[in-house]
Image (cartoon, rainbow, N blue to C red):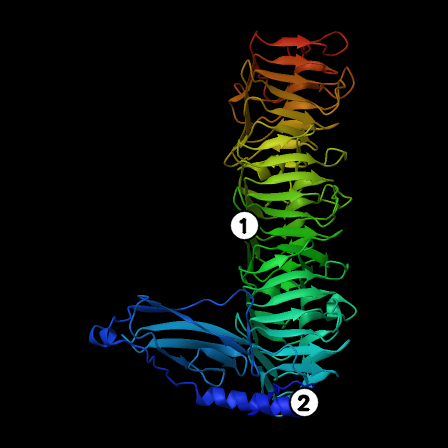
């Protein structure tokens, strides 16, 4: 193994000074263990000696440093008791190759490193220790580092300052080890690269970091390019990277740049003052084996293409990112698309989805830590496919945020979190804001569930341009949905809603497990985009817009739709609620909390109404304390009403305590059919403004008059 070290002498020193300094170092080494003995003891001291009880090495004055190459400092001791007879001490060094100490406590620094100086009393054999760090001589003349030097097998840079004047490449099969305290300075636009099967081991210490920096007298961000590593198993510990990353774009450079197959363990390092990225990764195989306890500051802050960390191939490259880094950035970690095909944890940092859209697939479970912020550039989204899932469970004090990357955010700045045919995702204490930018509001929301189910608890959805949450397809919905807040979602767009249950013939069924404790602030309410209710379910007390026909029907097991007091359903033009084969409707409000069925526009005949039109409908439907208005679509003489009963069996429906108003045709109408049975209509209903003559219950001699 070859080693290189910087000579301690300064080229500006004369020959005489150099010889004198060398002589002094040699004398210091020879005198390292000499003991001086006091000779002024009196006869009384000899007869009754006072023993030493303790010894302490006194602290140095602030700012005093020991420099390699012959620098000196003087240590002193305090002995107790003060009247001890024999106060002499013996000084020793734990490593005489790093620093020596003479009998007077004068310590001479020889090379960078950490050393322990010990003072031992001759009386009582008491000891005290003092740890010193010998610093590199910043004024030492640097040694030029060349390709020939680093490509000589296993090479170690022992100490001192090195200068890179030309681009360096560590070829395959060579390893470069850098010792604590080494400084490597790079000339303008220079870099150190490694090939596959070459690696750099740079392990400094907290007191003797390894420094990669600019060679310019007045250094600035971007002076040099960086360390470009395609080799694996590189290691950096207690290193400082500064004033680099000057290469064109963030895609191709950072102070530390792992590309193609490059991997590295990076711990306890500082990255600062880079023009573009502090750390960059490019290539699906580039990654951190460990990245923790590092500090990144002032990296890429003044350039649109700069980030503290930039991953050109997505989140998967960051799988080794630890939880204990300090990343000071107004932009966050830059992400360019990529595929996550294995489970990983997204640590508590700020991320910017900058270019292309990340995709999670192959059953990967992506866990997002509380306090994480994901910012999205225009039109960006995350797609979840093939059984993958997101577990984003924040806390009340540390929510997870999905938001816009703009300094001044607006509705629709980004797209969505889109989950397709992949059950099991969970969102808790999350904030979704400023998203949903797809023009077709029917299909997408800030959270879009396509034929899959997810748990959503204690979340906030706000400021979406179009829909807040989309449920698309017959198998979409929630495994839990409660204690959420939805506000300012789609309020300014006709086809947009806080929640849109659309497609697959499900509608209300998509909302089967929706809890009662959500706060939904909207003038339009939850959209029911299609709707066959074929199982028992309860409609919670919210505002709904019914955009298409809804049918309650299950010829086998039966289906009952229960609507809770205080619910309001607004029906779009030409729509209806039908209780069909095997269906039942339970709409029981209270005198103070009525259930409202009305039109999205308060125009008589806007919607068809509530239809009991099947002879196989289940018995026991109830309309109690309901307000039913603006139905009866059709001409005045057609058989339509706010409530229409046709060919039903006896006992199918009871209507009581209802206000039935503003039908274009009839208030309640019963049609003939194979069964001539009529609804149970009690006398405590009220009727007004139905048909041209304020009809209430209307029939004819064929059907029967009520």
- Would you place residue 274 above or below residue 101 in this image? above
Helix, strand or loop under label 2 = loop
Residue 463 place in picture, x, y as percent: 70, 38
Determine crowd level at label 2: few under 14, some 14-19, many 20+ residues with C-alpha closer than 10 A: few
Residue 154 can be seen in this image: no
On the image, numbered disc 1 is attached to which residue?
A: 370
Give residue 207's mark: none
**Comes first in the chain, label 1 or label 2:** 2
Which image quarter: residue 366? bottom right
Residue 319 place in picture, x, y as percent: 57, 65
Asked whether, in this view, residue 667 is left or right of residue 125, the answer is right
- Would you place residue 278 above or below residue 180 in this image? above
Determine crowd level at label 1: few under 14, some 14-19, many 20+ residues with C-alpha closer than 10 A: many
On the image, numbered disc 2 is attached to which residue?
A: 14
Label 1 to label 2, Cα distance in Å? 63 Å
- Foreground pick, 333 / 78: 78
Helix, strand or loop under label 1 = loop
Residue 86 can be seen in this image: yes
Residue 49 place in picture, x, y as percent: 23, 73
- Foreground pick, 100 / 361: 100
**Which residue corresponds to the image point at 23% horizontal and 73% vertical from the top-left?**
44
- Foreground pick, 33 / 541: 33
């Amino acid at each position: 193994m070859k080693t290189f070290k910087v000579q301690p002498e300064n080229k500006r020193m004369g020959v005489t000074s150099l010889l004198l300094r060398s002589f002094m170092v040699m004398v210091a080494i020879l005198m390292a263990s000499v003991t001086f003995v006091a000779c002024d003891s009196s006869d009384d001291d000899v007869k009754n000696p006072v023993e030493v009880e303790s010894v302490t090495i006194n602290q140095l004055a602030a700012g005093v440093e020991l420099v390699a190459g012959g620098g000196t400092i003087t240590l002193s001791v305090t002995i107790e008791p003060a009247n001890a007879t024999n106060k002499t001490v013996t000084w020793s060094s734990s490593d005489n190759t790093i620093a020596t100490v003479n009998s007077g406590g004068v310590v001479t620094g020889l090379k960078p490193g950490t050393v322990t100086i010990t003072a031992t009393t001759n009386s009582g054999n008491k000891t005290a220790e003092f740890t010193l760090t010998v610093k590199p001589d910043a004024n030492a003349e640097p040694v030029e580092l060349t390709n020939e030097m680093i490509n000589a097998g296993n090479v170690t840079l022992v100490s001192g300052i090195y200068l890179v004047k030309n681009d360096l490449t560590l070829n395959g099969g060579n390893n470069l080890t850098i010792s604590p305290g080494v400084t490597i300075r790079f000339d303008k636009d220079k870099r150190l690269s490694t090939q596959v099967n070459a690696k750099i081991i740079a392990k400094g210490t907290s007191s003797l970091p390894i420094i990669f920096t600019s060679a310019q007298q007045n250094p600035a961000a971007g002076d040099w390019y960086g360390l470009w590593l395609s080799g694996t198993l590189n290691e950096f510990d207690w290193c400082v990277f500064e004033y680099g990353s000057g290469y064109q774009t963030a895609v191709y450079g950072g102070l530390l740049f792992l590309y193609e197959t490059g991997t590295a363990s990076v711990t306890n390092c500082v990255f600062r003052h880079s023009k573009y990225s502090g750390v960059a990764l490019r290539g699906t195989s580039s990654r951190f084996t460990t990245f923790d306890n590092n500090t990144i500051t002032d990296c890429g802050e003044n350039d649109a293409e700069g980030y503290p960390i930039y991953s050109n191939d997505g989140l998967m490259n960051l799988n080794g990112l630890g939880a204990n880094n300090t990343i000071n950035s107004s932009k966050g970690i830059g992400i360019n698309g990529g595929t996550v095909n294995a489970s990983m944890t997204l640590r508590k940092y700020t991320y910017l989805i900058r270019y292309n859209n990340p995709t999670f697939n192959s059953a990967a479970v992506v866990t997002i830590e509380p306090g994480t912020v994901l910012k999205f550039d225009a039109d960006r989204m995350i797609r979840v496919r093939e059984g993958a899932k997101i577990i984003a469970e924040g806390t009340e004090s540390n929510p997870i945020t999905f938001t816009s990357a703009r300094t001044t955010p607006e509705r629709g700045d980004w797209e969505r979190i889109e989950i397709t045919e992949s059950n099991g995702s969970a969102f808790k204490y999350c904030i979704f804001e400023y998203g949903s930018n797809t023009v077709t509001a029917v299909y997408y929301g800030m959270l879009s569930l396509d034929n899959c189910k997810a748990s959503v608890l204690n979340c906030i959805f706000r400021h979406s341009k179009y829909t807040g949450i989309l449920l698309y397809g017959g198998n979409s919905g929630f495994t839990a949905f409660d204690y959420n807040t939805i506000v300012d979602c789609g309020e300014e767009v006709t086809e947009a809603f806080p929640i849109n249950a659309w497609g697959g013939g499900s509608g209300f069924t998509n909302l089967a497990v929706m809890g009662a404790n959500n706060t939904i602030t909207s003038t339009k309410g939850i959209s029911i985009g299609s709707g066959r209710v074929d199982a028992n379910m309860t409609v919670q007390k919210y505002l709904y817009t019914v955009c298409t026909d809804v049918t309650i029907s299950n010829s086998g097991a039966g289906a009952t739709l229960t609507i809770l007091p205080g619910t309001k359903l607004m029906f779009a033009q030409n729509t209806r609620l039908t209780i069909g084969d095997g269906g039942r409707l339970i709409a029981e409000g209270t005198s103070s909390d009525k259930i409202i069925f009305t039109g999205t526009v308060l125009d008589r005949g806007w919607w068809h109404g509530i239809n009991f039109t099947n002879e196989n409908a289940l018995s026991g439907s109830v309309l109690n304390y309901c307000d039913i208005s603006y139905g009866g679509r059709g001409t005045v003489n057609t058989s339509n009403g706010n409530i229409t009963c046709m060919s039903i069996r006896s006992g199918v429906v009871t209507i009581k305590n209802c206000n039935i108003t503003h039908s274009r045709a009839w208030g309640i109408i019963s049609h003939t059919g194979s069964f001539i049975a009529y609804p149970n209509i009690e006398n405590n209903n009220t009727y007004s403004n139905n048909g041209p003559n304020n009809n209430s219950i209307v029939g004819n001699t064929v059907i029967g008059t009520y």
